[in-house]
Each structure stands twice: as structure tokens, then as C-alpha cells.
Image: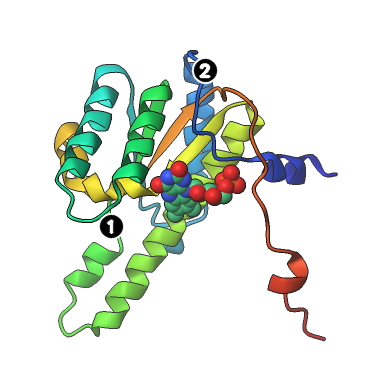
Amino acid sequence: MHPVIEIIKSRRSVREYRDKEVEGELLHLILEAGCNAPSAHNAQPWYFGIVKGEKKEKISGAIREYYKKMVFGLNSVLEQSARIIDSAPVIITVWNHCPLSSRIEKIKDIPPEYKGIIRDYEIQSISAAIENMWIAATALGLGMAWLGITVFCEKEIKELLNIRGNLITILSVGYPKGELSRTKRISLERIAIFYQ
Ligand SMILES: Cc1cc2nc3c(=O)[nH]c(=O)nc-3n(C[C@H](O)[C@H](O)[C@H](O)COP(=O)(O)O)c2cc1C
């Protein structure tokens, strides 16, 4: 199998990490993979807040405080995210600085659906950056998890990091602990339509 395909297929959500720091050079390579992603209008709408130690503990603490106040039941998924963040030596908070959507906001009489399309472009671009980072981490022997649920706590995390923009997700990064189970995939026959 081609090595790139092999790495793509071996990527997994890693939710428990060994007690081992991620080397600075490796973290750097992962972030470089992220910022080499394609983006709509090459706007590169992403930026990354890299968090370790006490600040990271504050983030998992804020997530726990948040779900205690929730009116509907996402407690267990948020608690799982807090535990993953505690287990990982480092997390990457991923933000949208909205270079396209903030510009379009200022145009008078723009149809509202245009705003949604432009915002989707930013999200698609940032998702490409996230996947690049995840594949790079896998190739470097590291594991990652995409903790999308943490956006519920955007306001609290933003305050802790004193950062502007929209929180897209938190990525946990570290050396995987234990066996990684394979997740099922829908077969190609069911999802790909080949036209003559
Ligand atoms: C947009 C998005 C949000 C996700 N949010 C979470 C999350 O909050 N918590 C979590 O444990 N995994 C989260 N995941 C990971 C998925 O659950 C995971 O990718 C999927 O189950 C397939 O497993 P695999 O990554 O091991 O192949 C998220 C993935 C994506 C793309």
C-alpha cells in the first residue's frame, strides 16, 4: 500500500495518552502541516493556541464547571473531553479569525445566505488544516483527538486564553496509550457513484 494511504488509514481518535511530553520540533511540524492546508481565497482563516500545564488544567476545569450548569445532557461527552485534555500533554485550540466572513458582514444589502456560504468556506478551510495536522501527527507516531464538543464552552475558553475569533475545536496531542481500535467505514460501493 502507498505509505500516504497507509498513514491515512491508520489515523485514529486517540483519547488516552502516555505520560510523555511532545517534543517541540514535532509540535512545530504538526502546526506547519496545518498551515500548509488549502483555504478558500488562500485566506488561511485559522490560528492556533497551543496550551500546556496549568492553563490546560484551567480549560478542563472550565469544561467541568460548564456542564454542571447545562440544562440538557451533554455532561458525559463534555466530561470525556475534560479527561482527554487532562491526559494529553498538549492541546491545540483551533480558531477562525473570520477574514472572509468579517469582510462580507460589512457589505450593505448582502443576501443573508451569502454570509453562511462564506462562513462555510472558512470552516472547510480550517477542517483541511485540522486533517493535515492529524495525518502529520499520525505519521510522526503521535495521536490526536478532535474534541468538537468543546465549542459549547467557547466563551469560557476564550476568556482563559484572551483570544479573539471563533473556537472551531480543541485537538489533544500526545503519545497514544494502549491499543487503538479500528473504527468502521461505510463501503465505497455505498458512497461513491461512478458516472460513465
Ligand atoms: C467535527 C468533528 C467533531 C468531533 N468531536 C468529537 C468530540 O467532541 N469528542 C470525541 O471524542 N471525538 C470527536 N470527534 C472524533 C470522531 O468521533 C471520530 O473521528 C469518529 O468516531 C471516527 O473515529 P476515528 O477518528 O478513530 O477514525 C469529532 C470528529 C469530527 C470530525
- Judged left or right of residue 8, residue 79 is left
Q: How many marks?
A: 2
In the picture as drawn, the residue positioned furthest to the right comes out as 1
- Judged left or right of residue 1, residue 155 is left
Q: Quadrant of the N terminus?
A: top right
Which residue corresponds to the image point at 23% horizontal and 35% vertical from the top-left?
Answer: 64
Q: Secondary structure at mark 2?
A: loop
Q: Secondary structure at mark 1?
A: loop
Which residue corresponds to the image point at 49% horizontal and 18% vertical from the top-left?
Answer: 22
Q: Which mark is residue 125?
A: none
- Judged left or right of residue 169, residue 4 is right
Q: Which mark is residue 98?
A: 1
Q: Please tell me whether residue 89 is drawn above or below residue 133 in the rendered image.
A: above
For label 2, the crowd category at 10 Å Cα-Cα, with few meaning under 14, some 14 to 19 and many 20 or more, is few
**Which quarter of the figure has residue 3?**
top right
Q: Please tell me whether residue 187 is drawn above or below residue 165 in the rendered image.
A: below
Residue 83 at least partly seen: yes
Q: Amino acid at mark 2?
A: Arg
**Which quarter of the figure has residue 57?**
top left
Q: Which sits in the foreground, 24 or 82? A: 82
Question: What x and y, as percent, mark residue 51?
Answer: 32, 26
Q: Quadrant of the C terminus?
A: bottom right
Which residue corresponds to the image point at 44% horizontal and 63% vertical from the top-left?
Answer: 40
Q: State the CA–CA distance, disc 2 to disc 1.
A: 35 Å
Q: Which mark is residue 18?
A: 2
